[in-house]
C-alpha cells in the first residue's frame, strides 16, 4: 500500500510539473508561432504522421466512382484554377508568392497523385486539414464537383503547362466548371442592384489578363519543366 501511495504521489507531482511547464510556455509567449520558424524534426514527424494516418483512416470506407471522363477532367481543371491554384502550383508552374510563405507549404499535387488514393484526395478536398491552411470545400461544393477535382489532381503529374491551358480554354468554351468565387462577387454586385447575378460573372480569362491573381502565368510558363 505504502509503495502504491508513493508511486501515485510521484506521478501526481510529475504531472503537476508538466502542467506548470506547459502553462508557463503558453502564457510566457516564448513559443514562436512564426510561419518562418520550422518545427523541430520530432514535432514535424508527429504532425505529418498524425495527418497522414488520420486521412488514411477517415477515407478508408469511401468508394471512388469511375474517374477520368473528359467533361469531368475539364470541370476539375476549371475549378482547380479558380479555387486551388493560389496555393497549389498548377501543372508546369511554380508555387505562388503566397504559397512560398506558407507553413506547412501546400504540397505539389504530384505528391498527392503518387502518395494518396483517389478516396483520400477526395476526403482531403471535402474536409480540409485543421490548422494547416487547407480549406474544406465540402460545405460549399457537391460531391460530384469534388470528385471532378479529385480526378484532375490524379492526372496532374502527366500534364504540361500547355495541356493545362488547353483544358482551361476548352472548359471555358463549353461553359464547364462552376466558379463559386465569382458567385460571391456576383452577390456583392447584386447588392448594388444587378438583378441577374449569373450574367454578371465575367469570363475567367480576365483573371489572367488583368493580373489580379498572384500568378503571372505567362512568366511561370517560361519555367515549365514538363
Ligand atoms: C489557402 C491555401 C490552400 C488552398 C486554396 C487549397 N489548399 Fe490544398 N493544401 C494546402 C496546404 C497548406 C496543404 C498541406 C496540409 C498539411 O500537409 O498539413 C494542402 C494539402 C492538400 C492535399 C494533400 C496533398 C498531399 O500531398 O498530401 C490535397 C490533395 C489538396 N490540398 C488539394 C487541394 C485542392 C483540390 C484545392 C482546391 C479545391 C486546394 N487544395 C486548395 C493549402 C491550400
Image (tube, rainbow, N blue to C red):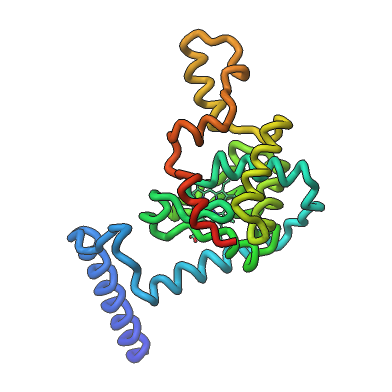
Residue at coordinates 23% horizontally, 68% vertically from top-left?
20
Front residue (pair 55, 217): 217
The mark tally for this picture is 0
Q: Is residue 6 above or below residue 38?
A: below
Residue at coordinates 48% horizontally, 54% vertically from top-left?
130
Q: The N terminus appears in which quarter of the rendering?
A: bottom left
**Residue 72 occupies quadrant:** top right
Q: Is residue 57 above or below residue 186?
A: below
Front residue (pair 134, 9): 134
Q: Residue farthest to the bottom? A: 3
Front residue (pair 51, 107): 107
Q: Is residue 221 left or right of residue 30?
A: right
Residue 197 in the image: state x and y as whole percent. 58, 17
Q: Is residue 59 left or right of residue 223?
A: right
Q: The C terminus appears in which quarter of the rendering?
A: bottom right
Q: Look at the image and tell me whether residue 110 can be seen.
A: yes
Residue 127 in the image: state x and y as whole percent. 58, 49
Q: Is residue 187 above or below residue 222?
A: above
Q: Look at the image and tell me whether residue 88 can be seen.
A: no
Residue 176 in the image: state x and y as whole percent. 71, 34
Residue at coordinates 31% horizontally, 74% vertically from top-left?
15
Q: Residue farthest to the front? A: 222
**Residue 42 occupies quadrant:** bottom left
Residue 192 in the image: state x and y as whole percent. 46, 11
Residue at coordinates 18% horizontally, 60% vertically from top-left?
28
Q: Residue farthest to the left? A: 28
Q: Is residue 174 above or below residue 66?
A: above
Q: Is residue 155 left or right of residue 101?
A: right
Amino acid at each position: 500500500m505504502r509503495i502504491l501511495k508513493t508511486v501515485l504521489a510521484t506521478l501526481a507531482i510529475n504531472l503537476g510539473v508538466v502542467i506548470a511547464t506547459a502553462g508557463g510556455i503558453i502564457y510566457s509567449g516564448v513559443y514562436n508561432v512564426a510561419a518562418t520558424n520550422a518545427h523541430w524534426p520530432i514535432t514535424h514527424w508527429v504532425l505529418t504522421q498524425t495527418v497522414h494516418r488520420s486521412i488514411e483512416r477517415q477515407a478508408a470506407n469511401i468508394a471512388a466512382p469511375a474517374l477520368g471522363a473528359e467533361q469531368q477532367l475539364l470541370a476539375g481543371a476549371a475549378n482547380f484554377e479558380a479555387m486551388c491554384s493560389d496555393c497549389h502550383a498548377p501543372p508546369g508552374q511554380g508555387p505562388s508568392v503566397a504559397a512560398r510563405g506558407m507553413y506547412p507549404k501546400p504540397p505539389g499535387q504530384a505528391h498527392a497523385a503518387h502518395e494518396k488514393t483517389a478516396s483520400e484526395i477526395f476526403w482531403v478536398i471535402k474536409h480540409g486539414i485543421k490548422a494547416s491552411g487547407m480549406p474544406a470545400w465540402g460545405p460549399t461544393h457537391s460531391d460530384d464537383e469534388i470528385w471532378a477535382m479529385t480526378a484532375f489532381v490524379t492526372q496532374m503529374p502527366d500534364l504540361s503547362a500547355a495541356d493545362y491551358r488547353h483544358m482551361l480554354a476548352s472548359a471555358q468554351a463549353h461553359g464547364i466548371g462552376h466558379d463559386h468565387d465569382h458567385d460571391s462577387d456576383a452577390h456583392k454586385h447584386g447588392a448594388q442592384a444587378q438583378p441577374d447575378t449569373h450574367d454578371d460573372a465575367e469570363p475567367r480569362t480576365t483573371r489572367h489578363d488583368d493580373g489580379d491573381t498572384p500568378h503571372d502565368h505567362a512568366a511561370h510558363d517560361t519555367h515549365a519543366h514538363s
